[in-house]
Image (cartoon, rainbow, N blue to C red):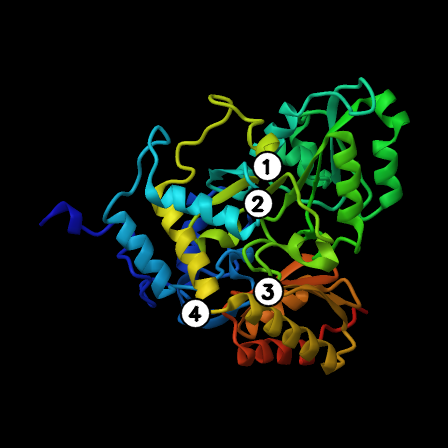
């Protein structure tokens, strides 16, 4: 038999239901995969649209989309065709060479970001790598303050922010449980209270600059995802832009979770109530960009930011490879072709209204933008609610003890949103004695 047709050992391919039970796959998982995530809640074998099926044949409405990744749902025909066609033509080269897909993707990202002349893109495999590139750009931004002689050595980030698990991205991430096992982390990072403009003013004040050095960059998420889907207060980013511009610091927006239509615009900072018309210096993006295929990017706005990393100062083996670029181009194309930005706004509003209108005493409110929402609970029982949802055939995420995160595919229909809302209308968790 041709070697190319031999089945892979331990897997016959295609995700056929019934090949092995979920329990059997979970047992194999426990002996083969590092225990960094705990046991899998289910072993999923196939998907279609907004639904996935587990190894035991049960269907689930996917309201998490791989944590805001599967923008087009599962097995979208345009996406799968684009990946297959590109793999059949040119799968990988090194970045010593360019490819049409890579170049076209960079151009497309600059266009949807409305980036000015002189802007450039660094393509990566993930959001964490995009943040690492931005961090290195901040390190290169070591000039002096425009109104003094203090070198720019400090990088500011916000409490509650999550930027990734590699060492530089982890230094920007405030959560102690993530940071402490791996300290010492790269230095010079300060964490400010979320949404506190007075604290931001102090960090840029002449006294702070004299005592601690100038600010090289401020890194923020327009909507904090892992902290429970918290949008920045209106006016905060505009204020941050004024301070960073005056100080010569970079304004870096981490849109890894919020970008590529998740909030109802290409990027969350483009919404007036969030961004206030700001033009950032760097935007990081990943997750939904490839529709499930690993790809990310750091978008540098303008010539100054785009030239902070010179030849040989950063690199990647797989970043911007032809398959990832083709996947991203297909994802962006479907979002535009099918009018998904408007659909995200409409379906997100419907989902929010239906959940809140049900009046379940366990639900306090729903917050967020577009199809990145958090159901705020009146008690810290999010883990129990997420388990109940899974048992009812819905995948959600207990993002905080008292909050459930919803980040479904951008193709979610109104009927599917109503199905989700019906669960939140009826879910109960008994009071502990």
The quadrant where residue 302 appears? top right
**Disc 1 to disc 2, how far (Cα)?**
7 Å
**Disc 4 to disc 2, how far (Cα)?**
32 Å
Q: Residues within 10 Å of mark 3 (few under 14, many from 20)?
A: many
Name the disc covering residue 396, or none: 3
Position of 382 relative to 362 (above/below): above
Of circles 3 and 2, which is in front? 2
- Which residue position is annotated with label 1? 302
Residue under the image location 34 percent in, 46 percent down = 323
Labels 3 and 2: the sequence-earlier one? 2
Q: What element does badge 3 sit on? A: loop
Labels 3 and 1: the sequence-earlier one? 1
Of circles 1 and 4, which is in front? 1
Labels 3 and 4: the sequence-earlier one? 4
Q: Position of residue 110 (x, y in %)?
A: 52, 46
**Disc 1 to disc 4, how far (Cα)?**
38 Å
Residue under the image location 76 percent in, 67 percent down = 377
Q: Position of residue 75 (x, y in %)?
A: 37, 63
Of circles 4 and 2, which is in front? 2
- Which residue position is annotated with label 2? 115
Q: Position of residue 24 (x, y in %)?
A: 40, 58
- Which residue position is annotated with label 4? 49
- Residues at marks 3 and 1 touching, judged by CB atoms closer than 8 Å: no
Position of 385 relative to 199 (above/below): below
Residue 79 relative to residue 227: left or right: left
């Amino acid at each position: 038999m041709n070697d190319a047709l031999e089945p892979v050992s331990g897997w016959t391919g295609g995700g056929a239901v019934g090949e092995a039970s979920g329990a059997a796959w979970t047992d194999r998982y426990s002996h083969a995969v590092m225990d960094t995530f705990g046991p899998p809640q289910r072993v999923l074998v196939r998907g279609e649209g907004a639904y996935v099926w587990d190894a035991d044949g049960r269907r689930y409405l996917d309201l998490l989309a791989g944590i805001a990744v599967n923008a087009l749902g599962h097995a979208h025909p345009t996406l799968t065709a684009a990946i297959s066609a590109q793999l059949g033509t040119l799968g990988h080269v090194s970045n010593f060479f360019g490819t049409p897909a890579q170049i076209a993707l960079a151009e497309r990202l600059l266009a949807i970001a409305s980036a000015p002349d002189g802007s450039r893109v660094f393509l990566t495999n993930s959001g964490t790598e995009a943040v690492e590139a931005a961090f290195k750009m901040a390190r290169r931004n070591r000039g002096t303050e425009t109104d003094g002689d203090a070198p720019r050595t400090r990088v500011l980030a916000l409490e509650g922010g999550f930027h990734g698990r590699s060492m530089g991205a982890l230094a920007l991430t405030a959560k102690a449980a993530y940071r402490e096992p791996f300290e010492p982390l790269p230095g010079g990072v300060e964490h400010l209270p979320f949404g506190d403009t007075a604290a931001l003013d102090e960090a840029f004040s002449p006294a702070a600059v004299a005592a601690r050095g100038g600010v090289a960059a401020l890194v923020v998420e327009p909507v904090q995802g892992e902290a429970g889907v918290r949008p920045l207060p209106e006016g905060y980013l505009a204020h941050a832009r004024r301070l960073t511009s005056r100080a010569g610091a970079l304004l870096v927006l981490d849109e890894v979770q919020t970008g590529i239509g998740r909030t109802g615009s290409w990027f969350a900072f483009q919404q007036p109530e969030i961004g206030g018309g700001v033009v950032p210096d760097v935007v990081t993006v990943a997750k939904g960009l490839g529709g499930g295929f690993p790809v990310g990017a750091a978008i540098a706005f303008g010539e100054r930011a785009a030239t902070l990393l010179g030849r040989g100062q950063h690199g990647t083996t797989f970043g911007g490879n032809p398959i990832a670029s083709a996947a991203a181009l297909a994802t962006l194309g479907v979002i535009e072709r099918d009018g998904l930005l408007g659909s995200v706004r409409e379906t997100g509003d419907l989902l929010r209204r239906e959940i809140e209108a049900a009046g379940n005493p366990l639900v306090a409110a729903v917050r967020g933008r577009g199809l990145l929402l958090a159901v705020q609970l009146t008690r810290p029982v999010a883990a129990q609610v997420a388990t109940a949802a899974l048992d009812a055939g819905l995948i959600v995420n207990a993002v905080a003890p008292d909050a459930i995160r919803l980040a479904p595919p951008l193709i979610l229909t109104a009927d599917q949103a109503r199905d989700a809302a019906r669960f939140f209308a009826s879910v109960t968790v008994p009071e502990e004695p």
